[in-house]
């Protein structure tokens, strides 16, 4: 059995008024936030799914279901990421690196990439160079291009420790 494992995660949320926009653990100034049971941080949700998948621990909805009443309603996704890292540690895994791509036509995310990386590294208790965050548009194609929501993709490499 190999000691290194790869995981992939994907998440999407639609825009909604009257909610803050949380991406990569930080609040990004925006007229619209994302709709979701938690804080709807698509970047962290995709990352959680990548980490859980790499360890064969199912997915974020399994561990933090929206069917558990108010337990996870409005929860800060950084808390969920911390719990995922605990689950990995219990299975004797540690993060080698992760790479996240946020697909958003709006808002422009370039000024927020480094604070996202730092926030995620802090939450996961890893070095900054183990966390990559990138942003892209979809060139006005699809629901992202029509400014209906945001999608995020994440991959990670974990290893037994």
Image (spheres, rainbow, N blue to C red):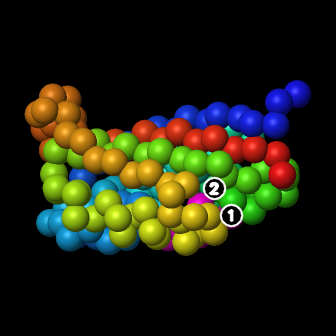
Nearest to the observer: residue 99 or residue 84: 99
Outermost residue toward the front? 129
- Magenta-colored stretch includes residue 82: yes
Outermost residue toward the right? 1
Q: Nearer the viewer, mark 2 or mark 1?
A: 1
What range is drawn magenta here? 76-83
Marks 2,1: beta carbons within 8 A: yes
- Magenta-colored stretch includes residue 79: yes
Q: Is residue 80 left or right of residue 147?
A: right
Measured in 3D between alpha carbons, the distance from the residue under mark 2 to the one under mark 1, in whole angstroms, is 10 Å
Q: Main secondary structure of the magenta part?
A: helix
Task: Determine which residue is flagged by label 1.
Answer: 83
Task: Determine which residue is flagged by label 2.
Answer: 64
Which image quadrant is residue 31 in?
bottom left
Q: Which residue sits at x=64%, y=34%?
A: 6
Which image quadrant is residue 84 in?
bottom right
Q: List x then y, in percent, for residue 15.
A: 24, 53
31 over 100 or under it: above or below? below
SS for callout 1: helix
Q: Which residue sits at x=55%, y=55%?
A: 130
Q: List x then y, in percent, for residue 35.
A: 34, 56
Q: Is residue 14 left or right of residue 155?
A: left
Whether residue 38 is visible to the viewer of this picture, yes or no, is yes
Q: List x then y, in percent, for residue 139.
A: 13, 32
* Sooner in the amino-acid sequence: mark 2 or mark 1: 2
Which image quadrant is residue 2 in?
top right
Q: Which residue sits at x=61%, y=64%?
A: 126
Quadrant in which the N terminus appears: top right
Whether residue 67 is visible to the viewer of this picture, yes or no, is no
Q: Which residue sits at x=81%, y=37%?
A: 3
């Amino acid at each position: 059995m190999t000691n290194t494992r790869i995981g992939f995660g994907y998440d999407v949320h639609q825009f909604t008024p009257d909610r803050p926009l949380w991406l990569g653990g930080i609040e990004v100034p925006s007229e619209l936030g994302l709709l979701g049971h938690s804080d709807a941080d698509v970047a962290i949700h995709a990352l959680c799914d990548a980490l859980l998948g790499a360890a064969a621990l199912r997915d974020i909805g399994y561990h933090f279901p929206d069917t558990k009443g108010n337990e996870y309603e409005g929860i800060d996704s950084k808390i969920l990421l911390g719990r995922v890292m605990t689950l990995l540690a219990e299975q004797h895994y540690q993060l080698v690196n992760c790479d996240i791509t946020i697909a958003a036509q709006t808002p422009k995310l370039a000024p927020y990439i480094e604070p996202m990386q730092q926030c995620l590294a802090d939450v996961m208790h890893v070095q900054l160079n183990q966390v990559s965050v990138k942003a892209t548009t979809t060139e006005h194609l699809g629901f992202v291009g029509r400014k209906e929501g945001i999608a995020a993709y994440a991959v990670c490499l974990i290893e037994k420790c």
